[in-house]
């Protein structure tokens, strides 16, 4: 169920999945983008962590959306998936076929970029349909490779979906992408690590509940929250890339 973890590794893993659950429900995105880089410091195999994160995302997305499906921008979701889904499938193939060192370098490089943008209060912004399509395709590819493409796609969705429907629409998007990814894993014989995902579900649930209760507060302090997280991501990603 778990690799040869020490007691300290188990403690770190529990804290990190609580953190991922908190971010996912608190921001509406980013559980993988802000959790996976830290998890890779415990065990540096993305293909081990990603199915666990995916299982949790499916569970909590379904839980959050069970009464909110009527408040989703289905029209924009369908039009954007034309660009996102093919890129996601290509990303999955990259994850399973490229050397692990390449994947780790890619993940930490993308995370470093996110961290710098948030630290200096710079937003990924699109003001044209061409740039929208590029961000959706590149974000879909990153999501297929590491589930960390959310910030790129959120930049596009935030411009095209009204605020009241944004969070729910993003949850549906994550649910669809993770379903595709998990199906691809299963069909290619990759372990989905279901027992580990179930074992970590309670701690992730604690983070999820805290995130739901603090969602409005996080949105009111969005800039400060992201600057703090950005500083953490810059330090972790820079050290990880140095070690790689």
Image (cartoon, rainbow, N blue to C red):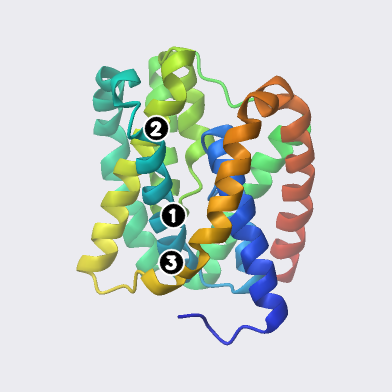
Q: Which residue is mark 2?
A: 136
For label 3, the SS is helix
The residue nearer to you, when weighing 141 against 202, is 202
Counting from the top left corner in percent of width and height, residue 52 is at: 44, 63
Q: Quadrant of residue 169?
A: top left
Dot 1 or dot 2: first in sequence order is 1
Dot 3 or dot 1: first in sequence order is 1
The residue nearer to you, when weighing 69 against 97, is 69
* Number of residue marks: 3
Asked whether residue 131 is in view, the answer is: no
Asked whether residue 149 is in view, the answer is: yes
Q: How far apart are the alpha carbons under marks 2 and 3?
A: 31 Å
Q: Is 82 placed above or below 161 here?
A: below
For the C terminus, the quadrant is: bottom right
For the N terminus, the quadrant is: bottom left
Query: Which residue appears at 79% of the width and 53% of the height?
Result: 235
Q: How far apart are the alpha carbons under marks 3 and 1?
A: 8 Å
Q: Is 38 placed above or below 99 here?
A: above
User: Circle 3: is it few (<14), some (14-19), or many (20+) Cα within 10 Å?
Assistant: few
For label 1, the SS is helix
Q: Which residue is mark 3?
A: 198
Q: Residue furthest left?
A: 187
Callouts 1 and 2 close, C-beta under 8 Å:
no
Dot 2 or dot 3: first in sequence order is 2
Q: Which mark lies nearer to you, 1 or 2? A: 1
The residue nearer to you, when weighing 134 against 155, is 155
Q: Which mark is residue 128?
A: none
202 lies left or right of 211:
left
Q: Which residue is mark 1?
A: 56
63 lies left or right of 49:
left
């Amino acid at each position: 169920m778990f690799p040869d973890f020490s007691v300290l590794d188990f403690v770190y893993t529990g804290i990190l999945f609580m953190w991922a659950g908190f971010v996912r429900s608190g921001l509406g995105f980013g559980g993988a983008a802000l959790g996976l880089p830290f998890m890779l410091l415990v065990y540096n195999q993305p293909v081990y962590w990603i199915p666990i994160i995916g299982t949790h995302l499916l569970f909590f997305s379904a839980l959050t959306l069970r009464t909110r499906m009527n408040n989703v921008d289905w029209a924009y979701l369908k039009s954007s998936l034309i660009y996102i889904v093919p890129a996601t499938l290509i990303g999955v193939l990259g994850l399973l076929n490229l050397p692990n060192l390449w994947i780790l370098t890619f993940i930490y490089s993308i995370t470093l970029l996110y961290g710098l943008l948030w630290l200096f209060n710079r937003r990924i912004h699109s003001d044209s349909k061409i740039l929208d399509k590029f961000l959706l395709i590149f974000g879909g590819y990153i999501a297929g490779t590491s589930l960390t493409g959310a910030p790129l796609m959120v930049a596009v969705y935030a411009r095209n979906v009204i605020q009241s429907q944004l969070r729910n629409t993003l949850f549906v998007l994550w649910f669809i992408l993770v379903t595709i990814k998990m199906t691809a894993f299963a069909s290619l014989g990759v372990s989905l690590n279901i027992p580990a995902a179930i074992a970590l579900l309670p701690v992730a649930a604690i983070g999820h509940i805290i995130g739901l209760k603090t969602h409005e507060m996080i949105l009111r302090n969005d800039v400060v929250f992201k600057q703090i997280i950005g500083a953490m991501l810059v330090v972790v990603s820079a050290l990880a890339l140095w070690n790689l």
